[in-house]
């Protein structure tokens, strides 16, 4: 019975999130504030349903649901939603929600195409460090997802400004300076969380295998991601990388995150 209820909850999440994305797209087109208000409310409802679904998976599996493709991608979407809802309380970025809501919906849609089977964690791998490590890492990906959306918006706005005539996107997107600041903030938070995820992951490894680092392919992939974002942080905050080059690096970094996450969970 609980399995059927969990599946219905997942379908509800998909439906509500698609409605939120549609509402944000309508707002992007019409720029009616009432539509934006509804879009934000629907996205908040979606996040609440996502949270309930995660709890349902925890109840079924008996452990933190972050160990399968379906669970990790879903948690990725949940973290991105939470990151955006937290972000918008402090910063106002024009039409940011449109791009983020589409990313969230695509992540949830992707999770619907992979197996939803519950796979218990092996006893020898169980540790309270695991949910801390996985939660921090996926939360980091959530903020890096926000940076990815901001980078896409930056390239769109830059293209508009470089064209001979300002087109459809120009009045609907923030200034390049605002988008560059957005990328800096999201990148910084994401990198800090990613670093904490690596540290807690090493503690988990020590507890279950007796060593902090095993050069396992999963660990190597995570290290590669961390080094990529370390370079970005150094170039942005020390060398002074800004603008188009920085935006392209953010996009490439996020693509590598998605591909690597897929490989890590194999």
Image (cartoon, rainbow, N blue to C red):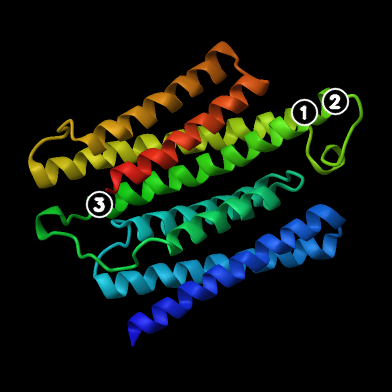
Snapshot quadrant of residue 160: top right
Query: How much space separates mark 2 and mark 3, taking CA atoms?
Result: 49 Å
Q: Do the residues labelled 3 and 1 touch (CB within 8 Å)?
A: no
**Residue 110 drawn at (x, y percent):** 47, 57
Q: Mark 3 points at which residue?
A: 130
Viewer can see residue 110: yes
Q: In this view, does 6 lie to the left or right of 148?
A: left
Q: Name the residue under label 1.
A: 159
Residue at x 43% of width, y 60% of height: 111
Question: Is 224 located above or below residue 98 in the figure?
Answer: above
Q: In this view, does 72 lie to the left or right of 239?
A: left
Depth check: give the residue in front, 24 or 90.
24
Q: In this view, does 6 lie to the left or right of 236?
A: left
Q: Do the residues labelled 2 and 1 touch (CB within 8 Å)?
A: yes
For the residue labelled by badge 1, is the local secondary structure a helix, a strand or a loop? helix
- Numbered badge on residue 122: none
């Amino acid at each position: 019975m609980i399995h059927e209820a969990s599946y219905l909850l997942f379908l509800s999440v998909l439906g509500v999130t698609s409605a939120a994305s549609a509402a944000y797209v309508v707002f992007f087109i019409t720029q009616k504030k009432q539509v934006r208000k509804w879009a934000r409310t629907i996205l908040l409802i979606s996040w609440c349903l996502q949270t309930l679904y995660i709890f349902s998976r925890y109840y079924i599996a008996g452990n933190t649901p972050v160990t399968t493709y379906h669970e990790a991608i879903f948690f990725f979407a949940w973290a991105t939603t939470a990151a955006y809802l937290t972000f918008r309380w402090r910063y106002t970025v024009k039409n940011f929600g449109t791009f983020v809501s589409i990313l969230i919906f695509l992540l949830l849609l992707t999770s619907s195409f992979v197996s939803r089977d519950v796979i218990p964690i092996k006893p020898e791998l169980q540790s309270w460090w695991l949910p801390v490590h996985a939660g921090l890492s996926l939360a980091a990906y959530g903020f890096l997802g926000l940076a990815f959306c901001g980078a896409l918006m930056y390239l769109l706005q830059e293209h508009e400004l470089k064209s001979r005539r300002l087109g459809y996107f120009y009045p609907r997107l923030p200034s390049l300076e605002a988008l560059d600041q957005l990328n800096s903030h999201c990148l910084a938070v994401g990198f800090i969380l990613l670093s904490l995820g690596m540290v807690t992951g090493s503690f988990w490894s020590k507890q279950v295998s007796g060593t902090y680092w095993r050069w396992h392919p999963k660990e190597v992939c995570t290290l590669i991601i961390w080094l990529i974002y370390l370079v970005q942080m150094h170039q942005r905050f020390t060398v002074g990388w800004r603008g188009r080059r920085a935006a392209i690096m953010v996009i490439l970094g996020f693509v590598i995150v998605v591909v690597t996450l897929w490989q890590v969970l194999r």
